[in-house]
Image (cartoon, grey):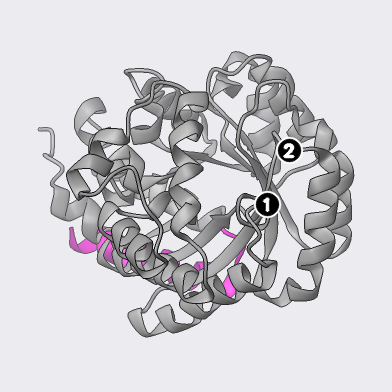
Amino acid sequence: MTTVITNEFTKKLPKCELHVHIEGTIEPELKLKLAQRNHIALTETTVEDIQKSYQFNDLASFLAVYYPGMSVLITEEDFYDLAFDYLRRAADNNVRHVEIFFDPQAHTTRGIAFKTIITGLHRAIVDARALNVDAALIMCFLRDLPKESARQTLLEALPYKDKFIGVGLDSDEHNNPPLKFARQFEDAAAHGLHLTTHCDIDQKDSIDHIRQALEIMEVERLDHGTNIVEDPDLVNFVIKKGIGLTSCPLSNSFVTPDMKGKELIDLLNQGVKISIHSDDPAYFGGYISDNYYKMATDFNLSKEQLIQLARNSFESAWISTDQKELYLKELEQYAAKN
């Protein structure tokens, strides 16, 4: 007899979020509030107008909407409000630990100081401890900007190294392979920072980009990356190395109708440490629990599979062994009671 998965089950499931862009969590209400506070005239004047503007069908068209949406982020308080607004939702989704991406170049190129960005975000994650959410920051390089920009961003960030735990790579992947930033990743690793990179779904040269990230740049996680199923040797590689993959079903649905769900299940069944996350939830229509629930209902996932996905998220996190054990014990207790 098949157990029906409820939204309540996925919402209360203890989980870890490893793939969420803080700039992608700005809800229309907050966007309007910050625009008013900073005297910025938006094209859209209502929540409904903003929601209607979220029209895209691939990575490039999404980014064309995404980056202009950041124009309302000006002050340290804006970045604090952005992060704390997300962290409230994370607490409501029973996210126990979260590692948040942020894109400093999207702001410094607008004249916003790096210190303003990192200080506002970091204050929010410290205050979120009162919500019982543990959080950390991952600084991403924008791959469609020159590698010199990434080099300068890393130099600017290093004095604040106590406020973030790793570096990532995101934005338009076309003609911007991971190896373009190999030097910046080596430098980051030399300073004790963790490494991850986006390898978005169904991109040109997807497998070659995944191979570069895994075999040459030695990333510790792969964001998206489900095209890896096309190369069994690379699948075996991530299994052997225990490298986690972060899949985002609802954002995938804007590129392919099946959300890469079959690939996710295939990788899960093979023993890959793949897990579910929300990516840019304000734009893609759902937070992390909604992603779990969508996968569960569309692909008839069992509670055991959902528990394993949550387990994989904790095991892929950049936290101590003791912290992992505490979260995993909490997860097992939830599983036993439900």
Please provide percent x and percent y for residue 282.
33, 47
* Image side of residue 216 versus residue 265, left or right: right
Residue type at the position of mark 2: Leu
Task: Indicate which label's residue lies in the foreground, 2 or 1.
Answer: 1
* Image side of residue 123 versus residue 331, left or right: right
Span of residues in magenta: 317-338
Rendering quarter of residue 191: bottom right
Rendering quarter of residue 329: bottom left
Q: Name the residue under label 1.
A: 109
At label 2, counting other C-alpha atoms closer than 10 Å, the crowd grade (few under 14, some 14-19, many 20 or more) is some
Vertical relation: 285 (above or below) 261? below
Of 245 and 124, nearer the camera is 124
Labelled pair 2, 1 in contact (Cβ < 8 Å): yes
Q: Name the residue under label 2.
A: 145
User: Can residue 20 be seen here?
Assistant: no
Of 79 and 195, nearer the camera is 79
Please provide percent x and percent y for residue 242.
64, 44
Secondary structure of the residue carrying tag 1 is loop
Of 230 and 62, nearer the camera is 62
